[in-house]
Image: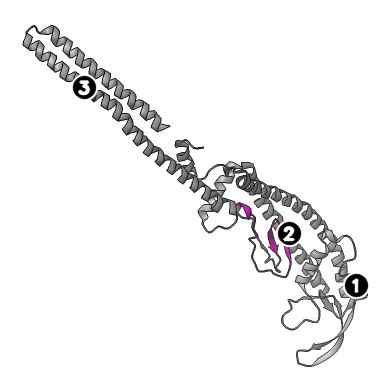
Amino acid sequence: MMAVSQLRYWFTVSVVIFILTMLLALAYYGYNYNSYTAPTSNLLDLRLAITLIVVEVPLGLGIAWLVPILFERRGKVIEKRMTDRYDELKGYLKKHSEEDILPVLKRWTVDSAPSTIFGGLRYTVLSVSAYYAPKRQSSIGKLTEPNTSNPNILADITEHLSKGVPGDWRKWNGLKIEVASHLGKVVDEWNRIEDATRTECQELGLVEWDGTGQEPLERCTMTRIVETLWVDSDPSRGSGKHVWDIDPIPKEPRLWVKPDGSGSREDVHRLLDLAASRNAETLKGLMRFLNSEGIEVRTTRENLAIESTAIEKEGQEFRTSLVAVADAYERLHVPVPASCSTCGRWLVELKSLGGA
């Protein structure tokens, strides 16, 4: 379009120049014809006017013919450069969308919690986990954006989502807060169970044992009690028999090694792998604690389950919105919404070239 406009412009200019030249020549001839009476002067003026006309006519026609041709060729060169640049920018945008943006959108949520599992107890919501460890050493993962080899790519994606789908982006930031709060409640409950169990075991005379070194005569395994209470109180298990409901408490002959190195056999009562004691009443007291504690843990887990379901639903809605963006691009050829600091300047230049 720019080449055509230039062609018309310079053609018009050439015609105007030609007409003005002719008018000046005729005016000059007419002025001299009226001003001088001498035949010689008139003859010279006539010759001069004829010469001017003879020269100016081909010159004006030549300019009128040559200038548009030159600018037409120049216009074609400019138009080709514009077309090549347009295609180049389109290629940049395509590569940016297909290699930078879409792969990350398809694998958005990740589990960024530590890989080491303490005590075997793990709780997960929206692909993020909390891991139990005794003595308040539990760890909590975070809901984060996917890792990318280039941090600038993640910054670009953040711009696209925050500008293009602001409602979904606000939902994502809200989910990060909700997940952190939810997992924090889980860890708080683990700590509360452990503290209550430790207090009860101390009152019953049971020594906390971590499974290393010589086994105490009266002992309890704290991590196993916390894990058992948590798993047994899962609302999905229903309201059946508890895993620790064993009657009578089984007895097992066991050789105990005394400090002096001598050993003797005594009757030892066991409550699964949770605790052991020479006194059956001690373990029955622990069972009563587990029954009452289990009720409280179950109530907490039911509330957590309701909250977890709501979080998972919001997370699924967010993932669905990202899938829709990717599907619209791949199947319907709809551009990735909005722009970022990388592709924004390409879009501005495309617009200046007449592109969308």
> In the depicted view, which residue is nearer to us: 228 or 51?
51
Residue 71 shown left or right of residue 316 in the figure: left
Please state the extent of the stretch shown in magenta in the rendering. 105-131
Instruction: Give x and y (percent) for residue 140.
Output: 66, 61
Question: For the residue labelled by badge 3, is the local secondary structure a helix, a strand or a loop?
Answer: helix
Instruction: Give x and y (percent) for residue 192.
Output: 75, 62
What residue is at 61 percent from the left and 42 percent from the top?
Answer: 166
Q: Quadrant of residue 61?
A: top left
What residue is at 73 percent from the left and 69 percent from the top?
Answer: 120
C-alpha distance separating marks 3 and 2 = 97 Å
For label 1, the residue is: 246
Residue 50 shown left or right of residue 70 in the figure: left
Question: For the residue labelled by badge 1, is the local secondary structure a helix, a strand or a loop?
Answer: loop
Q: Is residue 117 magenta?
A: yes
Instruction: Give x and y (percent) for residue 117.
Output: 69, 68
Tell me the quarter of the image containing the N terminus.
top left
Against 201, is 113 above or below?
above
C-alpha distance separating marks 1 and 2 = 28 Å
Q: Which mark, residue 144?
A: none
> In the depicted view, which residue is nearer to us: 123 or 331?
331
Task: Please state which amino acid type lies under the numbered disc 2.
Answer: Val
> In the depicted view, which residue is nearer to us: 227 or 103?
103
Residue 143 shown left or right of residue 210 in the figure: left
Local crowd at mark 1 within 10 Å, few (<14), some, or many (≥20)?
few
Q: Quadrant of residue 270?
A: bottom right
What residue is at 85 percent from the left and 70 percent from the top?
Answer: 286
